[in-house]
Amino acid sequence: MEKETSTQAIKGKWAGRFIWAAIVQGLIATVVTVMVLDPLQYITGTSDYYSPARVIAAGGAGTWFFTGYISYLVVGVVATAVTAIFYFYIEGIMGKVYKGFTNFLAWGHLIFMNVGVAGAMLIMMYQGYLAGVAQGNGTSSLQIHEQILGWTTDPIGGLILLAAIGAILGGLGYLIRSRAS
């Protein structure tokens, strides 16, 4: 019985795939964090008004950047890593390896959730940065919302919907695989 469980755990691939996705998302988050903190300003002694840290600190339109950043850390990195635990439980502990239709659902979960979250949050961060810079340059709030932020609501919403579809596919796969004999 012990040997059979070990064999089943080796066959399970989905926990590893989600861990790798979390690692990639974490790497992207690390790069963004370094860009936000702008460590060169402490070495060179120069501080640029357009530093992302200053855009966030200014509030207003820069809040979009902060919201996207925090959401990316929580959903893109942490939730992806936690999702790997669900797959490990089903495949490694329960010994129910994903195959056929449930394998298709897991691929949908991995791709749609990661592309949706990363795409939506990166758009939100970039546009929030641009909006914060515009606000710092004296651009009116109306112009900022019409020209910089307004068009982003549809792509962000669509990408969030894609992420939600991925999560639903994953949940459906969990239910089917965990109940299968």
Image (spheres, rainbow, N blue to C red):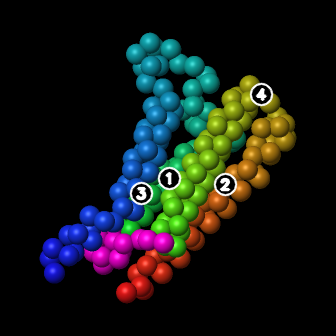
Measured in 3D between alpha carbons, the distance from the residue under mark 4 to the one under mark 1, in whole angstroms, is: 33 Å
Q: Residue at x 41, y 71 (%)?
A: 98
Question: Which residue type does callout 2 highlight?
Answer: Leu
Measured in 3D between alpha carbons, the distance from the residue under mark 1 to the one under mark 3, in whole angstroms, is: 11 Å
| Image position of 172 (left or right of 11) | right
Question: Which residue type does callout 3 highlight?
Answer: Phe
Q: Quadrant of residue 108?
A: bottom right
Q: Which of the two labelled residues, at mark 4 and mark 1, occupies the earlier sequence position?
A: 1
Q: Residue 63 location in percent, x, y?
A: 63, 44
The magenta-colored residue range is: 88-100
Q: Which mark is residue 76?
A: 1
Q: Which of the two labelled residues, at mark 2 and mark 4, occupies the earlier sequence position?
A: 4
- The residue tagged 3 is 18
Q: Residue at x 57, y 48 (%)?
A: 118
- The residue tagged 2 is 159
Task: Please identify the quadrant where the C terminus is shown.
Answer: bottom left
Most foreground residue, 179 or 19:
179
Q: Which mark is residue 138?
A: 4
Question: Which residue type does callout 4 highlight?
Answer: Gly
Nearer to us: label 4 or label 1: 1
Whether residue 181 is visible, yes or no, is: yes
Instruction: Using a 10 Å C-alpha cutoff, classify the residue at mark 1 as few (fewer than 14 neighbours), some (14 to 19) or many (20 or more).
Output: many
Measured in 3D between alpha carbons, the distance from the residue under mark 2 to the one under mark 1, in whole angstroms, is: 13 Å
Q: Which mark is residue 92?
A: none
Q: Residue 99 location in percent, x, y?
A: 44, 71
